Amino acid sequence: MAERLENQASAYLRQHAGNPVDWWPFGDEAFAEARRRDVPVFISIGYAACHWCHVMAHESFEDPEIARVLNGNFVSIKVDREERPDVDAAYMAATQALTGQGGWPMSVFTLPDGRTYYAGTYFPPQPLQGTPSFGQVLDAVLTAWTGRREDVEASAAQIAAHLAAGQLANRHLLGDLDGGVVPETPDEGWAAEALSAAVGVLSQNEDPDFGGFGGAPKFPPSPVLRFLLAHGHSGADTRPAAARLAARTLGAMALGGLYDQVEGGFARYAVDRRWQVPHFEKMLYDNAQLLRLYAHYSRAETDPDHRRLALRVTRETAQWLTNRMLLPGGAFASSLDADTEVNGRRVEGATYVFTRAELEATLGPGSPALELLDTDEDDGASHGLPGSTLRLAAVPDADQSAVWEEARTALARVREQRPQPDRDEKVVAGWNGLVIAGLADAATALAGTPEPWILRAAEAAGEYLLGVHWKGQILYRVSHHGAAQGIEGLLEDYAGAAEGLFALYAATGDPRWYEGAESLVTKACSRFLTGGTLSDTAAEPAEIRQAQGGVAAANPLDDAVPSGAALFAGVLLTSSAYSGAVHHRALAEALTAHVRRAGPAAPQAVGWALSVQQALTGGPLELAVTGSDPAAVARLLAAGRSAGGPSLVIAHGPADGVPLLAGRDTQAPALAYVCRAMVCRRPVSTAAELLGQLQNPAG
């Protein structure tokens, strides 16, 4: 029993190793056992930082009577959704189809072949406000299995057919990718119209009072913010609107309780529309994306106070990542728990919140730092918190920033003495790729201040990915304690890792990072593209294929993490910009052609693809910098990064194996070449000339 989970990479699975429930990890053996015993399968899906997952585990999975029923009548499988997003996506679709909603913990009952016949999310130990108890659910699904098997089979077939239709709709969005041919032959100018229309829809959907899109709960809209920042560097008429949308949301999140004002880093989401009260779990994938966004925003912002805030968030988030999430060997852990154990009881947010009395005891009753805060203890109490989150009332000026810096240092000392949340130390390849990209861009954004540790952290994580996860033929999704586990990476892992290595090359000029990224892109093409058909997984489990009605998954829509298809399109475009590979560009165009329809209809679902299409529309611009004088080269690189925008592709350093640098003059002190599709304008040698070319790329 316990030994099946106790050595798993996932902290979530290991948390359940001591349950009386006879858990199995997801795999062929578990389903074979269900077929041997002729019993249904119970699949429980969650993740280590999930508050309600802990609640249901304590209430039900630690209950000997519940365990007796499960062990005697089901094969029970425990799934970490972060480790197996392919499994989570299939059963989340089934849960939403059956109940109209989804979430974690997810509770799914399937046939021994993997097809769903009943599903829900959290079930309480006793009936509650119309929700049956978990014991009642077990009794009902078991009664159906034993007494109405034909109805169960029919229901499972119907659900699988519904999921198959959803997967086919996703494939229709992507169209035929054979040979990288765009599914529709678009009319001239469709992309510019679709991108501007997407900005218009986002403007209509914006919360005009507090930034972001929609009401509570509010999640960081990271993929679509990437698009807005990129569009803000374009020549479109909607450029100012895009820049304002991005600035308002980024500014509001940076001031609110979603952002940890003491230590840095962002919580997963806010439970209110004002970004005040977070759900306190901190996820690597959120912070990886937001770190990069604030680095780019700091370059775009012209107001000195707002720019200072963006740089502070960039620096502090990088510090939080290296202080709290960095593992031995250089990789980054997956998450910090929402809960902290206090006196044997799990309390959400206990590490982070302060009462007014605690603030005054730490800072002094008359501290000017208290005047900077927007705190409301009633607000925290209304959400069951033992204090208030810390939020800044307004963007601080230079003097106020210095006051807050001193205050947060004092508050950090107090917080360090408190119990700390648990950390899930599994390493996810794609998320670490996004962290590498964030750290690389943060290091260059903060280049005016000496922060070499940020770039060193990015390089160490790059070394870990190439040394532990990438075996030359297969990229493994997860590792633990420096050893890769046997789960092959998804498309999002190959593409996310390549995204990070390309960004690391742009920051350092070291061609080994470029070579690593190109090898991942090449392998992704052969592993995930077959006969014009894209798949999210290279080897989809038979049970997942059955659950989806026999159709392989290829979802082009973003979630909290960009879709694998969109990430893949982005690294294909970057590869073509560096190498001139026309087929990679054509495939990137094909993978993002659906934004012609989806962008104006649902831009928040295709934010990363919109950003790729923005880069396609702009070229993308390529910057090659060569020279014999390192200081002069550095000045040109700094100018290029300041004006080029998020889509700029940068090559520098040794020309070995990097086609964009091949044949360039390396004898002059420094030269910059601004190019499109490797066709370059005349080289320039000064920052002023380079800025002129980047600001007038058609000139």
Image (spheres, rainbow, N blue to C red):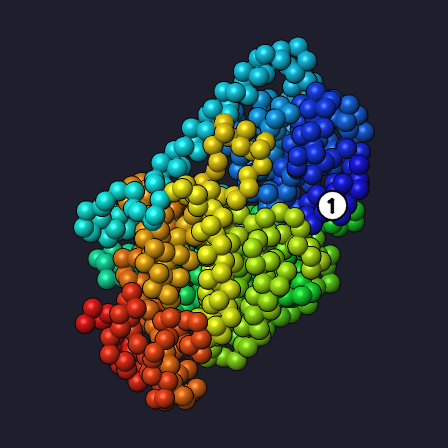
Q: Where residue 49 sits in the image (x, y, percent)?
A: 64, 47
Q: Residue at x 38, y 42 (%)?
A: 532
Q: 431 and 268: which one is in front?
A: 431
Q: Position of residue 71 (x, y in %)?
A: 77, 27
Q: Quadrant of the N terminus?
A: top right
Instruction: Name the outermost residue toward the top.
Output: 147
Give the side of residue 284 with respect to residue 567, left or right: right
Residue closest to the eye, 215 or 635: 635
Task: Tell me if I can see residue 363 in this picture.
Answer: no
452 left or right, relative to 363: left
In the rendered image, residue 581, in percent from the top left (x then y), is placed at: 35, 61
Seen in the picture, residue 629 relative to 606 is either above or below; the reply is below
Figure check: 97 above or below 206: above
Secondary structure of residue under mark 1 = helix
Q: Amino acid at mark 1?
A: Arg
Q: Which residue is mark 1?
A: 14
Residue at 50 percent across and 29 percent down: it is 550
From the top left corner, tell me how far across and down residue 302 is, in percent: 34, 70
Q: Which residue: 47% across, 67% down? A: 514
| Badge 1 density bin: few <14, some 14–19, many ≥20, Cα 10 Å | some
Residue at 55% in and 42% down: 539
Question: In front: 134, or 13?
Answer: 13
Query: In front here: 441 or 329?
Result: 329
Specify the quadrant that holds the C terminus.
bottom left
Q: Name which quarter of the figure residue 132 lies in.
A: top right
